[in-house]
Image (tube, grey):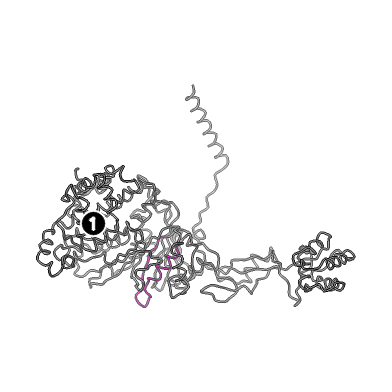
Amino acid sequence: MTNTSQNDTFDYAKEIWSVADLIRGPIKTSDYNKVILPFTMLRRLECALEPTREAVLNAIEEHESEWGRESDNYCAFSKKAFYNTTNFRLNSLGSTDTLDALMSYIDGFSDNARAIMKRFKMEDICKTLDEHGMLYLVCGKFAAFDLSPETVSDREMSNIYEHLIQKFGESIAENAEDFMTPKDVVRLAVGMIFANDDELMTSDSGIVRTLYDPTMGTGGFISDALDQLEEWHKDKKMIAPAVIVPYGQEVEPESWAMGKAAMLLRNVSDKESDVYDQTKDLSAHIEYGNTLNDDKFEYDKFDYILSNPPYGKEWRPEQPDVLAEARLGFSGRFGAGLPAVDDGSMLFLQHVVSKMKSAEDGGSKAGIVLSASPLFTGDAGSGPSNIRRWLFKKDVIDCIVKLPESIFFRTSINTYLWILNSAKPEGRKGMIQLIDASDKRASLRKNQGNKRFEIGESDRQWIIDTYINGHDHGNSVLVPYETFMYRKVTTQRPLRAILKLSEDNISTFIDSKALMNLSEANKKILRDFFIEFDKTTLLFEAADSVIKTAREGMEKPGIPPAVMATAMRLSCIEKGENYPIVYNNNGAIMADPDLKDTENIPFGIPFEDYLASEVLPYAPETWIDETVLDKGPLADGKVGVVGTNISFNKFFYHYEEPRKPEEIAKEIMDLETGLEEFMKGFLL
């Protein structure tokens, strides 16, 4: 097979993916990735180690008795953060016992590289290939690809991985790309959290910053952040430029393995690095596990955080552990509230905030990509509403960007980039910026799944500049967070009713469940009483006195008068706006439960003013029920339950005038005429 040019990474991916044609049959289509991805990774590791292989083997021969076969000391000889202690290569495994040789080869890697290969679970798939006499052939095919650092740079290798993932996703039409954030979105998020950080860009004093991704997938966010920093430092001839130490966690095994490998292989093509940089293991803090119930960095805080949690992923499997932590209140990560179990986005949002440093400790910035639901889902007092309220109180929401539609591979839903900052500058404290970038997009020449658009360089810079400058130009607003808060107050209206003593109502009353223990003799007395009663209507409050009189002829009724009076009211009530207002025994107006309602009153508007303008003109007898108070973990005990709702439409709604009926009618007629002409030509 002819190797493709080092500058044509898409061809590399195409050539590598062509191995799938070779394994079709013994390997299911859905399992192609279990062959293509790990063998690509293995070949890259092999090529990176090739120049120093002999040096490592010589070191083992000389120092094995002292160091053993596994020691970080060998990195000094491999000049990488990993090594291999065997003399195997993919092209030297042998045509017999190939599987045993391959497993020995993998076991000979240092523990950091070996953990990656083991997570791919290669042994089972390689057994299948071996049983069909194909393993040796597959190893030979991959050995023919020159993936050496001299031929393929780190960035080009990253592009190859992305193309392979996309190819796999297209081949099975499933969610293979769900864990991969498109590069244009990644670069925007990185650019926004690094915005205004002059120290990171220009410092030459050896400062160290940490970057964390709790849902890292294949590590795109981290890789691009490191790329951005290198681009800033390029050609500046710094002695001790700023350094970012990456941290990450991922639950999907194959994507974890690729992400960890990307960090392990980081800078293997950087010929200008000294030995220390070449042997620095950037994968050391890339952990495998579920962030929601197995936080690998429980006590850590980070300078920067980037995340793209899965959209609409239910957290039922993690529910017991999440509920247990939520019971800890604000001592845990989920004290503000819990979202619906079918979408864990706001759990990840709380987790990200829990990893941010306080302003006193220098603060942190975070970027998290979410669907629309975290903006508005949940009524006042619900978990999602309380989570937003908590974020407002902590004053960490700096900016939210509405991204264009159809920029992700597997979904075309609306997405939003939240920028969080725990140390806002003075002019942005208590404020939230909204940026409508929904039209900042360029069409792709060829769709990639659901991805039809991308955020180009100029559009990305427009968004970042708008964020930095806080512009208010029709596509951006900077407003106090109270703008998105309201109090949900309960309103009541008076009960206006009488008692109507019809034959049917009296029968319903006597046969009601409340009177089921009344003897038949007493029921007859009660029925006869109402037959002789000379009124057909009564004031609602008269039920007590009527029942008292009716009971005088009964023998041991056994049911309290108040119970009987209540049953009579329920059976005989008739409401009407012209009937008198009903009062209770204390002289207070009784509320009509059927007219109970709620009003969402924005913060800053007095209740009385709101009622006067929005309610009383239509329902003049309405009053606010002051017994319904604020509730939840942040309750202030005041009247009305605090709610939150972040609305982009409030600021950026664009009215589109409906098309004129005559235009639509003409279009339909033209279509019908065209269809008629087509049918004539087809049939005649």
Image height of 200 relative to 139, above or below: below
The residue range painted magenta reads 344-369
Q: Is residue 534 above or below residue 299?
A: above
Q: Quadrant of residue 344?
A: bottom left
In the rendered image, the vertical position of residue 383 relative to residue 97, given as above or below = below
Residue 22 position in % (x across, y down): 26, 42
| Camera sees residue 539 | yes
Could one spot residue 274 in this view of the protein?
no
Residue closer to the observer: 275 or 140: 140
Left or right of 89? Residue 660 is right
Q: Count residues near mark 1 (Cα–Cα under 10 Å), then give few for <14, some for 14-19, many for 20+.
A: many
Q: Amino acid at mark 1?
A: Asp
What's the residue at 78%, 63% (across, down)?
A: 511
Q: Please say if 603 is above or below 149.
A: below
Instruction: Give the image location of residue 228, x and y in percent.
Output: 28, 61
> Residue 354 location in percent, x, y?
40, 71
Quadrant in which the N terminus appears? top left
Instruction: From the top left corner, tell me how far across and down residue 357 is, in percent.
Output: 36, 73
Asked whether, in this view, residue 146 is left or right of residue 674, the answer is: left
Q: Can you identify the residue that label 1 sits on?
A: 154
Give the residue displayed 44% in from the left and 73% down from the top.
394
Q: Does the segment drawn in magenta span residue 362? A: yes
Between 251 and 349, the one lying in front of the other is 251
Tally of numbered tags: 1
Q: Quadrant of residue 523?
A: bottom right
Q: Which residue extends farthest top?
A: 684
Q: Nearer the viewer, residue 213 or 91?
A: 91
Residue 498 magenta-highlighted: no
> Quick one: SS at disc 1?
helix
